[in-house]
């Protein structure tokens, strides 16, 4: 595939530079989609030919979508879009969190201690109700999202009317790209901005959260188009990371530092795969139990 499916959708939705048909041609070929793709392609072709687009407007996806039946819309567009938006982002963030912890063994020890205290080593599952007690782990996730926001340049927005922000005139139709990573590493806001210090969210930045209210930390964006998956993402990441670190002891091969180089793209995955050695962390009988 010359261009990623996500990027295709992006260009289709935001720039109108690629038609919906081309965009759908690039969707991943999972079995369900393979069968449904043909239906959608023909549906789109027949439906879009009768749509008249305003002359000056680029051809965008929304008018096409509005004409699809709801069920088709959900299965062909919303479900893949949600999978695209949800899968990469959470797995990339968890990989960075684990990498940061492996390069900062004190922090890793602290997470393990917290789990020992609040979950204990005679219980297998960390439950949702445990998360409120795992404040250090929550801070680890926040600090990871600060240093490695999954969408470092967020998502492009376009102003729909002239406005003035902080004395700067912004005309209608201006494209706005926010450099989240730059804001998250601003030395005027964050002391030692490049250091991994989860504790800052328990002390100096205790009241800063990631839900779009504090503009110094907006990995999920802010305002009416901010990420609707924020609560789900935080819950999944906290629960998954807590369980992984509770079940296993993580180490790097030969105890080497993890390579923290980032790959380029709309999202920012690690440039190289994360390799770890895992060994059981709990007594054997706990793994045999179901609790
Ligand atoms: C670490 C996890 C995640 C991060 C960092 C993240 C980040 C973002 C960002 C920065 C945006 C753009 C906001 C803007 O335009 O200002 C966005 C949009 C979006 N996200 Fe997430 N996201 C994550 C997980 C998820 C999950 C789990 C879901 C779904 C279950 C999801 C669904 C969406 C959708 C549907 C949009 C588009 C919203 C719109 O345009 O109105 N995201 N996300």
Image (spheres, rainbow, N blue to C red):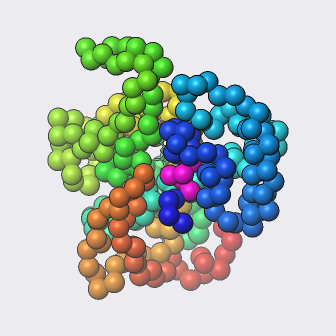
Q: Nearer the viewer, residue 19 or 195?
A: 19
Q: Position of residue 226 (x, y in %)?
A: 50, 34
> Residue 96 is drawn in which quadrant?
bottom left
Residue positioned 69% across, 28% down in the render: 52
Q: Is residue 271 above or below residue 174?
A: below
Residue positioned 17% across, 35% down in the render: 188
Q: Is residue 260 above or below residue 156?
A: below
In this rendering, does residue 6 appear at all? Answer: yes
Q: Nearer the viewer, residue 42 or 215?
A: 42
Q: Is residue 284 above or below residue 85?
A: below
- Is-magenta flag for residue 168? no
Residue positioned 65% across, 28% down in the render: 53
Magenta residues span 5-9
Residue positioned 45% across, 59% down in the render: 92
- The answer to whether residue 213 is left or right of residue 188 is right
- The answer to whether residue 29 is left or right of residue 279 is right
In this rendering, does residue 109 appear at all? Answer: no
Q: Position of residue 25 (x, y in %)?
A: 65, 57
Q: Nearer the viewer, residue 209 or 113?
A: 209
The quadrant in which the N terminus is found is bottom right
């Amino acid at each position: 595939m010359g261009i990623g499916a996500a990027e295709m959708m992006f260009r289709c939705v935001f720039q109108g530079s690629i038609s919906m048909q081309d965009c759908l041609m690039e969707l991943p070929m999972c079995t369900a989609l393979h069968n449904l793709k043909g239906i959608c392609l023909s549906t789109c072709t027949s439906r879009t030919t009768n749509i008249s687009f305003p002359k000056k407007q680029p051809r965008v996806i929304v008018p096409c979508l509005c004409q699809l039946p709801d069920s088709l819309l959900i299965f062909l567009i919303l479900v893949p879009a949600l999978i695209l938006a949800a899968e990469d982002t959470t797995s990339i963030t968890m990989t960075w969190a684990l990498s940061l912890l492996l390069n900062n063994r004190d922090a890793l020890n602290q997470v393990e201690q917290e789990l020992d205290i609040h979950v204990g080593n005679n219980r297998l599952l960390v439950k949702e109700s445990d998360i409120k007690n795992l404040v250090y782990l929550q801070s680890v996730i926040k600090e990871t999202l600060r240093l490695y926001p999954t969408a470092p340049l967020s998502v492009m927005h376009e102003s729909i009317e002239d406005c003035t922000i902080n004395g700067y005139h912004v005309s209608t139709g201006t494209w706005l790209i926010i450099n989240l990573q730059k804001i998250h590493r601003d030395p005027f806001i964050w002391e030692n901005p490049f250091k991994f210090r989860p504790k800052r969210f328990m002390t100096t930045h205790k009241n800063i959260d990631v839900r779009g209210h504090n503009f110094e930390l907006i990995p999920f964006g802010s305002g009416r188009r901010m990420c609707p998956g924020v609560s789900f993402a935080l819950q999944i990441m906290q629960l998954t990371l807590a369980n992984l670190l509770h079940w296993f002891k993580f180490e790097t091969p030969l105890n080497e530092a993890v390579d923290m180089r980032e790959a380029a793209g709309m999202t920012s995955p690690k440039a190289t795969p994360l390799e770890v050695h895992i060994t059981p962390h709990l007594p054997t009988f706990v793994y045999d139990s179901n609790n």
